[in-house]
Image: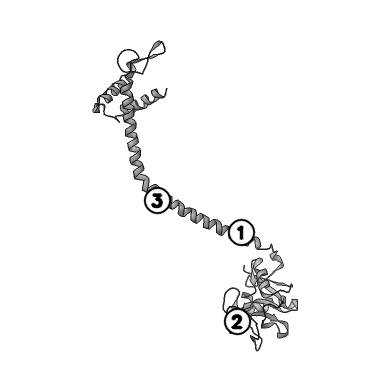
Amino acid sequence: MYFNWILMILCVGISLGQRIPEQSSQDQEMHLYCTNRGQHSVRTGHEIKQGKAGPVGPPGVVNYKIVNETIKEHFNDISGQIQAKLTQIGPVVEKSSEDIEDLKAVMQQIREQLASLISTLALHDIEDISTWYKARNNYYYKLFHDKVTYAEAKANCKKLGGQLASVGIRDEDIRREILPLVKAGKFSTWIGLNDIQEENTFIWEDGVTATAGSTPWHEGEPSSTGNQDCVEMRPTFDWELNDLDCTLRPKYLCEIEP
């Protein structure tokens, strides 16, 4: 069965002009076989059936040596063509492999960044923003009454998706607007300002460097006495700013960007 299929494929190729029958005696024999198949007969079992298998000659007589050699020659040609194509596309495949490795590296970076993002989001508490005060600058503010160190206050605000109050404190109008929130706590309150990195260079938690015009220090402050690197709003100083030891435990004011 497979042999007949092979013959059929070869004959189609010859009939379409893919082979020149004059190239060899074997090709000539094969050409005759294919072009006269309608007149040929084949022996199957003890019967002789008229059909399309066999060259001109006695019923069922086929020179299989010629056919086999022709098939082998055709397959050798095909093999050579395939090898030539592989040689041509080899550099392309190699380059593609390099691109694939680069793509894998990029995908790994994306996976790592997503994992980091998911981990960060998982740290954030679910906070009902409706319990926060929305100021005219569209930031949200809330005073927290638990008494913690500056580092703990900063971390707690960050978990809620915000920061220790900074933007609203250095803006005089917004500071006046949210001051009642702080006063309601009746206790010293951390805001987002410190000179931890460099003495006497105070930086707001959003990265802005403090200036004299935007920092409502109490008279004589910052005093920088001892290890006073963090800033509070102090009730005894009429809620003006005072530098304080970062390990002490006031309340704290958070803000969330709109």
Q: Quadrant of residue 112?
A: bottom right
Q: Position of residue 193 (x, y in %)?
A: 62, 78
- Report crowding for label 1: few under 14, some 14 to 19, many 20 or more residues within 10 A (C-alpha): few
Q: Left or right? Give the position of 44 relative to 26.
A: right
Tell me the mark number nearer the camera, choosing from 3 and 1: 3
Residue at image position (43%, 52%) is: 99
Q: Left or right? Give the position of 236 relative to 169.
A: right
Mark found first going from the N terminus, 1 or 2? 1
Tell me the mark number nearer the camera, choosing from 3 and 2: 3
Work out whether 115 lies above or below 219. Answer: above
Label 1 vs label 2: CA separation?
Answer: 36 Å
Q: Left or right? Give the position of 2 relative to 244.
A: left
Return the residue at label 2: 214
Asked whether 19 or 25 is in front, the reply is 25
Q: The residue under label 2 is which amino acid type?
A: Ser
* Residue ranking furthest to the top: 46
Asked whether 208 or 111 is in front, the reply is 111
Return the residue at label 1: 118
Label 3 vs label 2: CA separation?
Answer: 58 Å
Asked whether 169 or 75 is in front, the reply is 75
Q: Secondary structure at mark 2?
A: helix
Q: Secondary structure at mark 1?
A: helix
- Report crowding for label 2: few under 14, some 14 to 19, many 20 or more residues within 10 A (C-alpha): few
Q: The residue under label 3 is which amino acid type?
A: Lys
Q: Left or right? Give the position of 154 relative to 89.
A: right
How many marks do you count on the picture? Answer: 3
